[in-house]
């Protein structure tokens, strides 16, 4: 069975190569994209090779869609008073800590937690919390244990619907929620929950670092919001 899969995979690659040979314009475009254009400007090529989200200069970025990152980068500043909570951690935590006053992230993977915690800036904190299905959303309630209010909550990890439902009371009056992969049907319940709470939705469709398929990052906001939407 495994051999059969390998043979089919090799056959698919051969078919793709033959197709490119007979479509020279497409081949030239792909070769051009290796050194110039959107994939270079966004850092997509760097991300694909390194298998982590990086910009064109090799600096950390979130694994959100590029349009969402562009939108946020114009609105976040190291001189502002924005406090941010992040479900999930990584290059994004470093990226946000350079642009907001304070970042707190929760991470469920111990190996990843140990790797990231030593890379963070002084204004960033990471909390380790395992995901335990029997505890009914204990991970998603981590934000409540901080006893703080946040201007921005990023949801890009485990238990996303539970995270949506448990983070609202920890938002400031001008707080926004950012949900990645919002096109997925399994998050519909959480999205409808926010709609009933009076949140509007702004979608940013596009590709993300090292990924060549379209997905969506959505910002949920109210009339008064810290991003001036």
Image: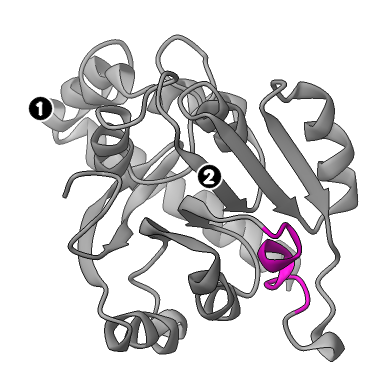
| Left or right of residue 209: residue 102 | right
Question: In 3D space, how far apart are the residues under numbered discs 2 and 1 (Cα atoms)?
Answer: 46 Å
Across and down, in percent, residue 9 comes to 54, 55
The answer to whether residue 38 is above or below residue 128 is above
Which is the main secondary structure of the residues drawn in magenta? Answer: loop
Q: Please tell me which residue lies in front, 50 or 171.
A: 171
Which disc, if any, is residue 6?
Answer: none
Marks counted in the figure total: 2
* Disc 2 target residue: 84
Residue in the image at 42% along x and 62% along y: 179
- Label of residue 25 in the image: 1
Disc 1 residue crowd, few under 14, some 14–19, many 20+, Cα 10 Å: few
- The relative height of residue 33 versus residue 146 in the rendered view (above or below) is above
Q: Is residue 162 in view from this perspective? A: yes
Circle 2 — which element? strand
Foreground label between 2 and 1: 2
Which of the two residues, 171 or 137, is positioned nearer the viewer here? 171
Position of 184 with respect to 37 (left or right) is: right
Asked if residue 98 lies left or right of residue 196, the reply is: right
At horizontal 72% and vertical 21% (from top left) the residue drawn is 122
User: Disc 2 or 1, which lies upstream in sequence?
Assistant: 1
Name above or below for residue 192 compared with residue 73.
below
Residue 228, position as x, y percentages in the image: 19, 44
Position of 149 with respect to 190 (left or right) is right
Nearer to the camera, 182 or 18: 182
Residue 223 image position (x, y, % from top left): 17, 63
Residue displayed at 89% across by 45% down: 111
Q: Please tell me whether residue 192 is drawn above or below residue 127 in the rendered image.
A: below
Front residue of 220 and 64? 220
Q: Which residues are magenta?
A: 138-147
Q: Secondary structure at mark 1?
A: helix
Where's residue 124, x and y in %? 68, 32
């Amino acid at each position: 069975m495994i051999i059969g899969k390998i043979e089919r995979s090799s056959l698919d690659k051969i078919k793709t190569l033959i197709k490119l040979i007979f479509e020279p314009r497409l081949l030239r475009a792909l070769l051009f994209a290796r050194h110039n254009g959107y994939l270079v400007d966004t850092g997509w090529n760097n991300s694909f090779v390194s298998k982590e989200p990086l910009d064109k200069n090799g600096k950390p970025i979130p694994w959100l869609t590029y349009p969402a990152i562009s939108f946020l980068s114009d609105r976040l500043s190291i001189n502002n008073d924005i406090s941010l909570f992040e479900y999930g951690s990584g290059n994004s935590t470093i990226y946000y800590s350079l642009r907001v006053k304070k970042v707190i992230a929760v991470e469920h993977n111990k190996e990843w937690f140990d790797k990231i915690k030593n890379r963070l800036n002084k204004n960033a904190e990471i909390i380790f919390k395992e995901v335990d299905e029997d505890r009914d959303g204990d991970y998603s309630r981590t934000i409540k244990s901080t006893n703080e209010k946040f201007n921005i909550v990023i949801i890009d990890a485990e238990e996303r619907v539970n995270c949506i439902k448990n983070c609202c009371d920890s938002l400031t009056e001008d707080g926004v929620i950012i949900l990645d992969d919002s096109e997925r049907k399994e998050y519909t319940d959480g999205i409808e929950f926010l709609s009933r709470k009076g949140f509007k939705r702004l979608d940013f469709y596009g590709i993300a670092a090292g990924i060549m398929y379209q997905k969506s990052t959505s910002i949920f906001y109210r009339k008064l919001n810290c991003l001036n939407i």
